[in-house]
């Protein structure tokens, strides 16, 4: 790549969020200038044993940190801002987002003790901001968190519209519909839109996503019918949902208590910034709920995903500090299970029913609507924006694939559609879209305080340990290779020793025999001894019990 | 309990299948006589690390094995017959079931080398059989496996109708509708039905479950449209589904190849017993598919649940021996994801799309119908049978709870409905249903060849190992407690050693210091030394890296 070409061209590089759900992050480059769009985390799949979080590989932007003009954020969900505390340890650039987005980010940066070094710049939806050499318009859209924007970023070849997470809610809670006019204006302008990057999450759903108002009607009915306490679990960041529950509580003369760390945190930020209206005298501390009549209590809680440590999950298990579920309680789980969580949510529902609660959840009533656009909205976006090029984002491969097909049906030529892989640098030229390059990219695993110090080998070991446990064989030898003590066998996660004494004894005998043979043959090389131990047990254990524990020989030389 | 009371009373004891999905097993007792109904396995949840299967605790029936008159089976699914190979190692009783059910069981017993000792008695749907002192009627119902029956077992208080898995398909593939007349006759008889045990799986679904024929229409359309190969994944035991695919293949002049161990096995048994009609000259070996034009090939395969080793999953990954997915292939996943498998199925779909296949699956078209009755069918069953008592079975707690509500709406008095827990002995008296007793019951875990030798402690260790790995501290001391070698630290599944040298060195130093202190204070007690090692590391490691690996001190005395 020489600089001349670069200046003519416009590239977008993805460091995450395509072919996967989570860790959304894009880098726009025009010549030497670089703009980062979102920087999210991904929640680990089951096979990432012990991993807390997954962030994008930031090496590409770190290597180019002097070129970064700024970071622009679409909204405050974890999969769009959760990576920033890790990124901001490595780079320093001004961050632009709406008030709520930055309010939520602020909390994170405080926790990571980064806040003082960061430059946060509030942008209002509907306004335009200059980020270094980039002109960025923040365009109001609807989503399951307030203050979400699409972005229009101007380039020499026309604006790029980045609408990662959105829906079109014709009757939104805050009264602010999406800025259809801006999208229309961009689509209608003489230069035209260069490229649309659009949300693929719900491309498999026909029609329109229901309005958040629909949930309000269901919530109202539930409150009207409830005779005792009402307990509502939802995503803490879904401020509009929280508002609707608060409104219903108000209407039916109930107080409201909040519980769960992220609920308390989000409610606090949203109230402070004016996104959530809760009269002060409506709020009670959860410890005081028991002093109120049950029909005057509403509880807003975390745990809609059945997370083991969340408040609702504790209530279901019966080990919440302040709340015991009892007959007559109405529990509403106002969220859908994120793929992979279905089991946990189901278990929570079962336990709540067992404790006598009346549980209302998505499968059986309209207590939740998605925050993402369905097919008709996606087509509307395409038709409004009329992009030259189209890049489906925010989805697993099948979603991107189907969104590409949808775009083609709406009229985008197949050659102008690009299905991206993480790490792709997409080059937008006057006459074509194409892959320019692959940058270093991938999943960086966070486990505790460790960033990237757990990788495939460690995970493979954890998997092996998790399935059949470990057998440790310890033997002490002298300098001539004669056995002084052992071999001793210690196991963890393998069998109940008491019930398997015979097996362990026989195994010890086998190791002993094998080591004696080594002794007789004057074998003293540790690696050979270790292999001998491993080999003497591997097949034997598998034959006896059809398990493959990790076998770890430890040799001590005195 | 004295014998006199027992003779008057009729009890049903559940050893599994209520409050859980899987390991269905009931024991009917009339006086001294005992009858076992089904004996299934449960597939382990994610938290049962390394466990292959879960079977019921059989102790109660083993202790009473002399009283067992026989075992009756409703159908050939794993969750109803999979426990038998383990049960039959402990007891010997004649087994009654329909031809296909026993055909499938035979295969299992052969594998476990139990077949020669077993007495299998074929019963035809619609007939009555004497099992010791019990009169049992086998009543045709529809389900996702052929030859499924409900049972009516006669007792001095009237018949018990056990309809664990069923639906009412008005247009079934084999032309045999459920035996409505028998249910009606039982419900209408002067003595009346004592109790109904009925399938709760789909109690949350309104209306009727669609007929299997509906899938046939979709399959036909898919075959008509397919230009190249058609690859269909489904449950191997769903013989009617397999038949419909074979029929479509025949109609569109395609050969058919079968792949996957259970598919080959089930097709073989079903063909041999006359449940599946596939003309011999239609079948090709999978190795010969490549010699045929693509538009003459149909492949029937396992892997509809995304199981890692199944044939379709291998094709998606690109490591199947004989089949490479290519552009133009039509892949139909004719099954729904069992809760917990959604992720795996999703991954398989993504990979197939990536390889260029056109993938058709449940979310986007009618390629699957459930085998279980929906609300209207459940009500119909209740109204036909008109039971005095009602016990919802085959479901998690919320399903049982809702099925109980449904029965109440249909007219069964609340007091006559019993929601059972595993281990409950339910007593049916003339005037009431009540809990008589708790028998020993629970989950017995199978890991490799081990039955019940993995329990909570082993699982807790596996979980701990899986999350943060293990740190082994080895030290060799002399008889006076002086350190000769070590301490040495070995880790697995914890961190990449190369990237964490400092941490390990500092940790080693801490152990050394702690042990020196012991030496100076003449502490030689091993348990104290071990605790010292553990304590010196626990907090340190957590502070440094926020992980809690298992810490295993090993002391060798020379």
Image (cartoon, coloured by chain):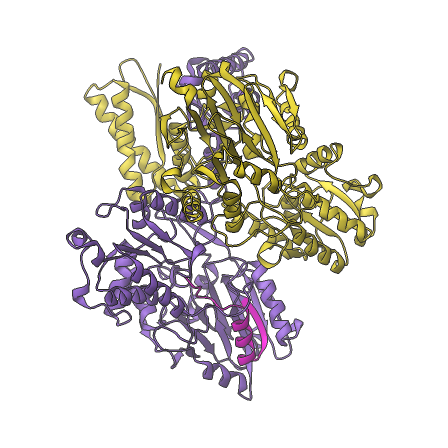
Chain colours: A purple, B yellow
Q: Quadrant of the N terminus of chain A?
A: bottom right
Q: Which residues are magenta?
A: A368-392
B520 up-or-down from B498: above or below: above
A282 up-or-down from A303: above or below: below
Depth order, front residue of A94/A291? A291
B554 up-or-down from B341: above or below: above
Image-based side of A477 in relation to B376, left or right: left
> Quadrant of the rendered structure where residue B305 is?
top right
Q: What residue is at 71 percent from the left and 50 percent from the top?
A: B231
Instruction: Tell me if residue B200 is in the magenta stretch.
Output: no
Residue B221, percent from left and from top: 72, 58
Image-based side of B56 in relation to A284, left or right: right
> Quadrant of the rendered structure where residue B129 is?
top right
Residue A211, percent from left and from top: 42, 70
> Quadrant of the rendered structure where residue A487 is?
top left
Q: What residue is at 22 percent from the left and 45 percent from the top?
A: A321
Does the rendering let one see residue A391? yes
């Amino acid at each position: 790549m020489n600089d001349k070409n670069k200046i003519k061209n416009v590239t977008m590089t993805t460091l995450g969020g395509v072919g996967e759900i989570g860790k959304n992050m894009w880098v726009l480059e025009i010549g030497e200038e670089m703009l980062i769009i979102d920087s999210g985390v991904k929640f680990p799949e089951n096979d990432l044993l012990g991993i807390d979080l997954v962030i994008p590989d930031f090496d590409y932007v770190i290597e180019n940190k002097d070129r970064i003009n700024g970071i622009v954020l679409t909204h405050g969900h974890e999969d769009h801002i959760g990576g920033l505390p890790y990124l901001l340890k490595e780079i320093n650039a001004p961050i632009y987002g709406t008030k709520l987005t930055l309010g939520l980010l602020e909390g994170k940066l405080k926790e990571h003790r980064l806040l003082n070094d960061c430059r946060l710049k509030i942008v209002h939806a509907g306004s335009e901001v200059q980020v270094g050499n980039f002109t960025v318009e923040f365009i109001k859209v609807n989503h399951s968190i307030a203050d979400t924007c699409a972005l229009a970023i101007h380039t020499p070849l026309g604006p790029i519209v980045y609408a990662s997470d959105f829906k079109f809610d014709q009757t939104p809670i805050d009264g602010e519909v999406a800025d259809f006019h801006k999208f229309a204006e961009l689509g209608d302008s003489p230069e035209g839109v260069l490229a649309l990057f659009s949300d693929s999450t719900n491309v498999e759903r026909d029609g329109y996503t229901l309005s958040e108002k629909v949930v309000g009607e269901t919530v109202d009915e539930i409150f009207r019918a409830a005779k005792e306490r009402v307990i509502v679990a939802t995503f803490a960041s879904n401020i509009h949902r929280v508002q609707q529950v608060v409104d219903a509580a108000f209407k039916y003369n109930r107080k409201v208590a909040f519980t769960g760390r992220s609920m308390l945190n989000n409610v606090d930020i949203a109230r402070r910034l004016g996104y959530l209206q809760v009269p002060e005298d409506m709020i009670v501390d959860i410890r005081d709920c028991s002093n109120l009549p049950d029909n005057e209590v509403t509880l807003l809680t975390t745990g809609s995903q059945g997370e083991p440590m969340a408040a609702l999950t504790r209530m279901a298990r019966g080990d919440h500090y302040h709340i015991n579920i009892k007959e007559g309680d109405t529990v509403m789980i106002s969220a859908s299970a994120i793929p992979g969580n279905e089991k946990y949510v189901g278990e929570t529902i079962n336990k709540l029913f067992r404790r006598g609660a009346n549980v209302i959840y998505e499968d059986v009533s309209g207590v939740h609507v998605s925050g993402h656009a369905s097919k008709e909205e996606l087509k509307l976006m395409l038709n409004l924006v009329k992009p030259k090029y189209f890049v489906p984002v925010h989805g697993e491969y099948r979603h991107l694939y189907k969104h590409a097909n949808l775009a083609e049906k709406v009229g985008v030529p197949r050659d102008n559609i690009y299905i991206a892989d993480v790490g792709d640098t997409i080059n937008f030229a006057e006459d074509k879209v194409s892959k320019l390059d692959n940058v270093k990219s991938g999943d960086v695993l966070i486990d505790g305080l460790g960033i990237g110090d757990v990788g495939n080998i460690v995970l493979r070991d954890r998997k092996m340990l998790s399935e059949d446990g470990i057998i440790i064989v310890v033997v002490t030898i002298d300098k001539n290779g004669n056995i002084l003590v052992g071999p001793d066998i210690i196991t963890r996660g393998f069998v109940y020793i008491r019930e398997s004494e015979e097996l362990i004894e026989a195994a010890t005998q086998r190791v002993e025999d094998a080591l004696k043979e080594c002794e007789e043959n004057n074998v003293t090389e540790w690696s050979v001894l270790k292999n001998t131990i491993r080999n003497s047990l591997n097949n034997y254990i598998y034959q006896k019990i059809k398990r493959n524990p990790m076998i770890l020989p430890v040799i001590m030389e005195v």
